Image (cartoon, coloured by chain):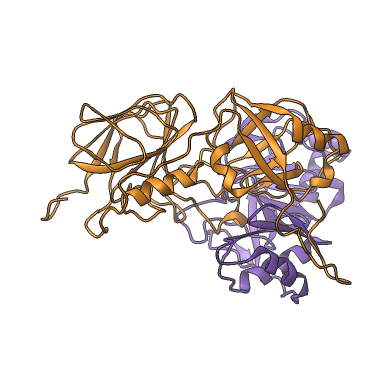
Amino acid sequence: MTGGARPHPPVLEVEDPGPLATVQDLGRSGYGHLGVPPSGAADAASLRLANRLLGNPEAAAGIEFTLGGGRLRPETPTWVALCGAVLPVTAGGRPAAMNTPIRVQGSLELGTPQAGLRTYLAVRGGIAAERVLGSAATDVLSGLGPEPLRAGAAVPLGPADDLGTMPVTVAPVAPLAAEPVLRLLPGPREDWLAENARATLHGGTYTVAPDSDRVGLRLEGPPLPRREGELPSEGLVTGAMQVPPDGRPILFLTDHPTTGGYPAVAVLADRDLRVAAQLRPGAPVRFRLQVSAHQVGRRRSAGSARLGGV
Amino acid sequence: MKLRPAGDRALLAEVDDLQTVHRLHATLRRAGLAGLVEAVPAARTVLVVVDPDRLDLGWLAAELPTWPLADAEPAEPADTGAAAAGGTLDVPVVYDGQDLPEVARLTGVPAEEIVRRHTAAEHTVAFLGFAPGFGYILGSDPALEIPRRAAPRTAVPAGSVGLAGPYTGIYPRASPGGWLLIGRTAVGTWDPDRDPPALLRPGLRVRFRAVSSP
């Protein structure tokens, strides 16, 4: 950035947001007891990487593009980086690469990814959107945070003057698996699964339903038989797999409701959240049930509680 | 207390009653644990979410059952402009909800009597969930307990007061909802610019009062 006083913060013009573009950071924490979802980038690992490539704090706000398609124009030459679902990038009329810092002068155009769903744009200095409860993230369930970006939106950028040098020139990222197998840990209500449901879950192939979104993946496939009856509402975590009475599981992402009355029979292993966040409607997915690290070697002592068994 | 697993960064503590939920929630909030991200109370449980780089879940699982439980936090209603007496939030309600006849039918209690019982009962906020600021308010009158609506509405206006099971809820904003609507209130339960942003909190006592206009 050039020196001297600016009349206003630099701005990134959104000429076309593509199918859905939202401001995301690492979300809101500490307000779950008030009914506030954590929100934040569904594939947080990709946002973090994009930020690191630019020397930003990992939690700096960026833009989450769903199925690519955006066209943006920074007011002044600006460093950006794109991570997540791989798509064709054109910067200033020339092809550019993902997973590396790009100097953009003129327009930045995103194509459509062939695989994956969400691509993260980080800007050096971060997106300076207004924060609600400590975060600039758009929460599509509760409506907190900024509105999804519309054509013509002018997104303010943060200052880049105090950032260090950009440490990395390119970050190799493994491609997404064609048929991912997501690792599930025991959930708090694993005992609500019928015995044969476990085998179904472990062996079945599911498909991501069209009404999946940032709230969660709705899964089509073999229904999971479960105990009948109702469960008093209880807290839910990101990655929880909830089974409604019809047996069709829901895998919650970051805009999940904070409580729910259907049993959470399993929880996605943390490191597979980024894989789940990249599954597009129609994509196949399988699951593998794992034992939690905390289950191993637990002591059983009289009168003390212990983690529920596998 | 029974602890149930909830993934790499959380566990679910299940206890016997709502008062213990509130005491456990207060205990966790006062413990000053670095790496405690969330403590989400609900009907019979507290979900504890940690940052595993700062707080070891296995350690917490071993420690938590040994802690003496604090008294539940006394709940002071935030300033709303509405009258508050002795720590009880006053909620004026126009009892003209479109589901009042249905509630009367399901409970066998006539509509006027429903209003009398609802305003006479003692209510306590059990927990928040479903949406920011949405409190599940437990009522003391078992005659008003009802099942959830079979066909949820697509749009319930903000300020709507509804019943489901043993709870009363006040919708903080227009949203889909499955509760039986008995009235409406002008009391705002959610304002992100207010501190705290939610008007309701677990343990807060609530009294509903019939008015002719909101």
Q: Residue at x 74, y 29 (%)?
A: A204
Question: How far from the left and from the top, in percent, is residue B9?
Answer: 63, 56
Q: In this figure, what is the number of numbered marks? A: 0
| The image quarter in which residue A142 lies | top right
Q: Looking at this view, is B193 or B181 the one in front?
A: B193
Q: Residue at x 50, y 42 (%)?
A: A43
Q: Is residue A237 left or right of residue B53?
A: right
Q: Looking at this view, is B33 or A37 the one in front?
A: B33
Q: Residue at x 87, y 71 (%)?
A: A303
Drawing shade for chain A: orange
Q: Is residue B64 above or below residue B211?
A: below
Q: Residue furthest left?
A: A4
Report if residue A144 is visible in the image: no
Question: How far from the left and from the top, in percent, is residue B115?
Answer: 76, 46
Question: How far from the left and from the top, in percent, is residue B200?
Answer: 62, 57
Report if residue A290 is visible in the image: yes
Q: Is residue B131 left or right of residue B197?
A: right
Q: Looking at this view, is B25 or B168 the one in front?
A: B25
Q: Looking at this view, is B45 or A114 the one in front?
A: A114
Q: Which chain is purple?
A: B
